[in-house]
Image (tube, rainbow, N blue to C red):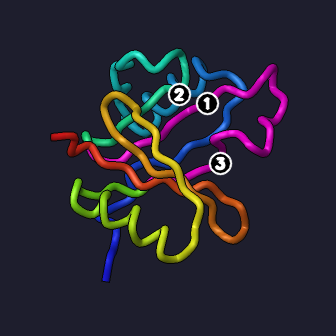
């Protein structure tokens, strides 16, 4: 059976991205991943170089649009399972798309309640 390896990250909306970044770093000991060039958001924070959080700032404290990237959660897989998940989702008639995040590639799709699910691989070789 096809399965994911681990939770890669959770993504949340915050009112003040600088304040929240500082809070998560000081409170939970998370470390900020250097921005690889994807723009000012999200701020990605890692726990011991494994799982992490993606912080997205809301628009002036207002909720983000329903079609935004929030909320979502991501699972990590190797390159072989990344390819297999594309076939698996197609077989299940689930709409999906791929995005290149410079340091990773991700498959995005929705669950029955419309939550955004991400399958990520850092195995880009």
Q: Residue furthest bottom?
A: 1
In magenta stretch: residue 124: no
Question: Residue 112, image x and y in percent?
Answer: 69, 71
Q: Which residue is mark 3?
A: 71
Q: Which residue is mark 1?
A: 56
Residue positioned 37% across, 49% down in the render: 120
Camera-nearest residue between 28 and 40: 40
The N terminus lies in quadrant: bottom left
> SS at mark 1?
strand
| Badge 1 or badge 2: first in the primary sequence | 2
Camera-nearest residue between 35 and 85: 85
Q: Which residue is mark 2?
A: 42
Question: Residue 115, image x and y in percent?
Answer: 66, 59
The C terminus lies in quadrant: top left
Question: Residue 89, image x and y in percent?
Answer: 48, 68
In the visual, does 93 lie left or right of 78?
right
Label 3 and label 1: CA atoms lie apart by: 10 Å
Question: Is there a contact, CB below 8 Å, between mark 1 and mark 2?
Answer: yes
């Amino acid at each position: 059976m096809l399965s994911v390896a681990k939770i890669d990250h959770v993504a949340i909306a915050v009112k003040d991205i600088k304040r929240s970044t500082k809070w998560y770093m000081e409170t939970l000991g998370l470390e900020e991943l250097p921005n690889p060039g994807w723009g000012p958001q999200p701020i990605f924070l890692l726990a011991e170089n494994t799982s992490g959080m993606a912080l997205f700032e809301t628009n002036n404290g207002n909720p983000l649009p329903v079609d935004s990237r929030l909320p979502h959660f991501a699972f990590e897989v190797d390159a072989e399972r990344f390819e297999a998940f594309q076939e698996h989702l197609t077989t299940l008639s689930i709409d999906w798309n791929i995005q290149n995040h410079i340091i990773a590639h991700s498959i995005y799709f929705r669950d029955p309640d419309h939550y955004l699910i991400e399958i990520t691989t850092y195995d880009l070789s």
